[in-house]
Image: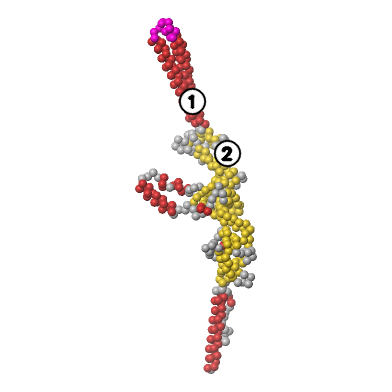
Amino acid sequence: MKRKSLFAAVAIFAGMAIGGYWLWLEFSASQSVALMTVAVARGNIEETVLATGTLKPARLVAVGAQASGRITSVKVKLGEAVKAGDLIAEIDSVTQQNDLRTAQAALANVKAQLVEKQATLVLNQQSLTRQKEMVAKNAVSKADYDSAVADLDVTQAQIESLQAQIREAQVEVETARVDLGYTKITAPIDGTVLSIVSQEGQTVNSSQSAPTIVILGQLDTMIVRTEISEADITKIRPGLPVYFTALGEPGRRYDAILESIEPAPESIKNDSSFSSSSSSSSSSSSSSSSSSSSSEAIYYIGVFKVPNEDSHLRTYMTAEVHIILGQAKDVLIIPSAALGSADTDGRYTVRVIAQDGQITNRKVEIGLNNKVTAEVRSGLVAGETVVTGETSARAPTISSRGPGGPPMGL
């Protein structure tokens, strides 16, 4: 009986030992580490700055009215192409026509007065000639002669005054004629009608503001105004290659050259330094402006043009712009995740797996690095395997392998 009890205790102890060893093996397998690797290969790489841009026509003109009155007709349709000088709209011109007639009548009146004075001048000259002859013969007094001279001078002065009035009246006529021309609104440029702001029958008042009738744009060339973050602006200069895609067509790429960068962000228009208020309020405003500007993102505007002969690009489209800082083709590349920390000489440490499976650290020289892919300039050759990371390889769970422990009844 004692022997059976001892045998049962030994069996239970052995089963516990076997189960514990099996659990230890399971835990060790679950904690094993697998390496993520990639082979060094040849490919292309580019380092870019990503920005957002807005498309606008190369020329965008708001065609306004310089005359006041009711719009009697609009001669264009939305989307219509027009040439410079084409009639856009007409404003009721009765008032301007009456002003022109009034100015012409005033001019005619002054001209008639001039004709009258010129006839008087001829008469005065003849009278003076007779007075000279009679004075020479002592037939008239010197006073009559002086009076004839004075009459001639007065008439000449009146003629000069009327000539000045005629010039003034001619200016009035020309002004009235120009004002009448303003009632016919014509296109200042070749372009496409992008918007009709004022409709037929609407009354416009040019004395209070400059009312816009239509907006024209030249769509054969588009300008892309790109917002570049202040964190990237120091790396960018005019002349760099750029490309962009429209949000609706991510697969179609448009290439161009960055032409210019505006020297200040558009927020400079709201700078409190331009305020004419007192120094105290200016100081308060400046501190408030500084506080608000520090919490707002600052963007500088980069500008470039792109052809648009087919008018495929539209006004105010949003563009995803890539400004190329550097690019290389057919070079050795590896994932940026394979790079270790950089040394003081700028070289990086990379873990390389040899053919026998041994892992060694190697110093490499890196060129372009866009944080996804890095260019290898020296230290590696094509085909070598580098470590990019590690991951835990967990073994199957206990439940998936079936129940453990000794057989029943042991």
Secondary structure under tag 2 reads loop
Q: Is residue 400 visible?
A: yes
- C-beta proximity under 8 Å, tags 2 and 1: no
From the image, which quarter does the C terminus lie in? Answer: bottom right
Of all residues shown, which one is farthest toward the bottom?
1
Query: Residue 137, position in %: x, y?
Result: 43, 5
Residue at 58% across, 44% down: 221
Query: Residue 91, position in %: x, y?
Result: 51, 34
Residue at the disc numbered 1: 170
Question: Is residue 139 shown in magenta?
Answer: yes
Question: Is residue 306 shown in magenta?
Answer: no
Which comes before the other along the chain, label 2 or label 1?
A: 1
Residue type at mark 1 is Gln
Residue at 61% across, 67% down: 385
Q: Which dot marks residue 190?
A: 2
| Magenta-tinted stretch | 131-142
Residue type at mark 2 is Asp
Spatial separation of the CA atoms under disc 2 and disc 1: 34 Å
Query: Residue 153, position in %: x, y?
Result: 43, 16
Q: Is residue 387 visible?
A: no
Closest to the observer, 202 or 235: 235
Crowding around mark 1 (Cα neighbors within 10 Å: few <14, some 14 to 19, many 20+) is: some
Query: Residue 377, position in %: x, y?
Result: 60, 61
Task: Examine the rendered structure and indicate whether residue 34 appears above or below residue 325.
Answer: below
